[in-house]
Image (cartoon, coloured by chain):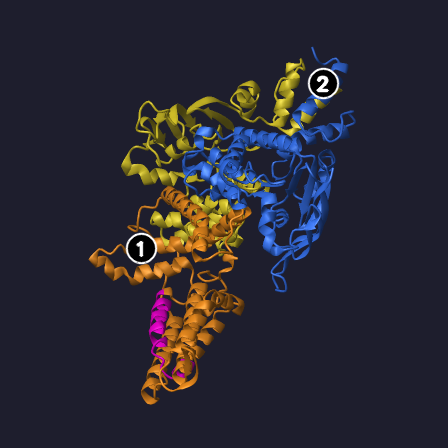
Amino acid sequence: MVRDVSFGQYFPTKSVLHRLDPRGKILMFIAYIVIIFCTFNYVSLGITAAFTLAFLVLSKISPKFYFKSLKVILIIVILTSLLNLFYGSGEPLWQWWIFRITLNGIHRAVFVTVRIICLILASSCLTFTTSPTELTDAIERLMKPLKVVHFPVHEVAMMMSLALRFVPTLLEETDKIMQAQKARGADMESGNLIKRVKALVPILIPLFVSAFRRAYDVATAMECRCYRGGAGRTRMKQIHLSARDFIAFALTALMIGGVIVCNILLTATI
Amino acid sequence: MSFISIQDVCFSYDEDSAAPKAVDGVSLDINAGEFVTIIGHNGCGKSTLAKHLNAMLLPDSGMVVVDGDDTADENKTFDIRAKVGLVLQNPDNQLVAGIVEEDVAFGPENLGVAPDEIRRRVDKALKAVDMYEYREHAPYKLSGGQKQRVAIAGILAIQPQCIVLDEPTAMLDPSGREEVISTLLKLNRENAITVVLITHYMDEAVLADRVVVMDGGKVLTQGTPEEVFSQVELLKKHRLDVPQSAELAYRLRGCGLKIQDIPLTQDDCVALLEEALR
Amino acid sequence: MSCVLELKNLGFVYGKDTPFEKKAVDNVSLQIEAGEFIGVIGHTGSGKSTLMQMLNGLMRPTAGQVLLDGRDIWENPKKIREVRFRVGMVFQYPEYQLFEETVAKDIAFGPQNQGKQGEELNKAVQSAAAFTGLKPELLGKSPFDLSGGEKRRAAIAGVIAMNPEVLVLDEPTAGLDPMGREVLLSQIVRYHKERHNTILLVSHTMEDIARVADRIMVMNKGKLEMFAPTKEVFSRGAELERFGLKVPQITKIMQQLRQKGFSVPEGVLTVDEAFEALLPLLKKEGRLW
């Protein structure tokens, strides 16, 4: 069922990670994305994977939910790893028709799989341990300098936060609409691609209609609660950098340093 | 001096002046501390009227005065919305944040209240609706009644003197309805908050100090629940519900049974029949 | 009469074999005769929605069987769609399912999936619209331009148009005003009288159930606690209250009078019945003039 998706949820388990400054978390996450694509040998890949695992353990969230978010992208992982497996360069180890597997291909498949998995786990870890409001709050603050060039920082942050809030609601709604159309004999499981795409119409149209109606309602509700844009707004939850954050920064720096050193000292595998 | 004074308000969603008006010459006073219910069919203008009470809509003619301020005065819009909170029908669409307490904080944050004070207000509001233990939950995991109580807390955190609720129980199951109504009664009695409740349910309407019946954009009748529901004929003519006890008593009275006050509750009705049959 | 729907030890467990295992429906067995009007009541989370969704194969039971005309609906899972045409399901707030350009096309969605065409399709749409009281001039309009009550009718017509033998309605009157509730309910009753099919009506409004149902299913914590004629169910008010349910106000009033020793009948369900019962008693006392 659609509503089984755990990606983008927040779990208030009150771990060390929950108490980190969300701004710091976002910056570390960006650094992490960059560095994970700069792992060119198994040692550096191992370092980042170990680093990721450490964070998952620290989050005190059941591995079940991490598995759930992985399940969603399983197909993408398999496809990309297969693609990489068959399109490596060098001497073929095995060949059949247009498919040829090389040692380079195997390495590339392993790298791409581990990288995607790490990426998904890390982003799940970020959203699991940071409430949507904290997240958008942090983005708003990080982007504040952009206000100088008249970028609507507050509005963008508010839109993101509302979008995150309504993801589960809309998923639930999709599920309901699907059941209702199935009860009217809608066939979503059989037929060719065109037929299947057509079968989505009875689901997508009601979904859009309801999303617009909701948007209208939400706007009214926000105005009723004295919303008038970002000017003069305060926040209940203040965010401060503390010693904890600097330790996290230091650890991230250590990981980045480790990866860079490995890349310099060891030869690249891919 | 009444807290809200509605003076001959007309409003139409249509530019065309010949089209029927949504609200057509309504005058009504809401006193501080009162519990008022407004009943009537869909499209009778009660929701439109509700939106006039906190300056979400402005009258085409006539005026609405809230605590001495005209809602048409643009400088006062946010003062008025801080005094009169509006709760809508669908609880899902009123919760704007992903965490209960952050949602409740939304209102005071908009008003620029200091962080410590927001924290205090949020805790107080959540306790008032009995949702404090759920403060760190995600709204979509709550039941309908719980969501609606969080929505009420979100309004309470603005510290309004009056709460207007537009069919807050229409989408709830019986236990959710009960949760919301008992919360409202408590707020009205213990915190002296003025409540204007729009509803389809007669068992909710009878709990009020005053019932206002609307039809076709106009006020059809108003008075205490006893006064209003004893006009069974008028209500039936406009195809509005009456409590079953009132209907029974009304019909028996039609056959010649002497009844002074039409009973609105089960106990009153039993007492009345017991007396008659003895 | 013949049995149209039979449930045999039906069960449904969410998250089987996980720590979050939850029995939503627990060993429900019952038989429904063709042409019956069944009321279904139960607290939110009592399992009634899950039970209803198993009747037309939207959910597959984890235990037991659903027999439609004596045959297990999951006998051939590939043919489950046919079961959905025979057991029509109107969900709560069904108006969210509307999607077509016109009301007529939307109502036609179900029968079209059934394979109906041309005149036959047209007739199904027209008669379904008539049953729900949709005015013919609305059929050419966009469903999104209708009023709330009209949308609800259009959506219900979309299920009725499939001419199901069994029609399940989940809270069809939720959110409507008293007049809308009243009108829709009497249309459902009329539809039942004319088509003679089986109806299961899920509702929180006991007054409505009391007025229309022949028999009532009472669900609590996944179990079928009662399945008996309407009068009998409502005369067991104390038990119902234990399941978080309420009997209609009028039933309670008459019950209390009975307990106080007055000779009023048991299981009074409507104001009419109460009135008829009280009138002779009051006459005897000489209270009427």
Picture layout, residue A69 above or below residue C125:
below
- In the displayed structure, A54 sits above or below B218; it is below
| In magenta segment, residue A41 | yes
Identify the residue shown where x is 42% and y is 39%. Answer: B86
Query: Which residue in the protein does label 1 denote?
Result: A156
Residue topped by disc 2? C279
Q: Which chain is orange?
A: A
Colour given to chain C in the rendered image = blue
Dominant secondary structure of the residues highlighted in magenta in the image: helix
Q: Is residue C93 magenta?
A: no
Alpha carbon distance from label 2 to label 1: 69 Å
Task: Classify mark 1: helix, strand or loop.
Answer: helix
**Quarter holding residue B236:** top right
Residue C269 vertical position relative to residue A26 in the rendered view, above or below: above
Q: Quadrant of the N terminus of chain C?
A: top right
The span shown in magenta is: A23-46
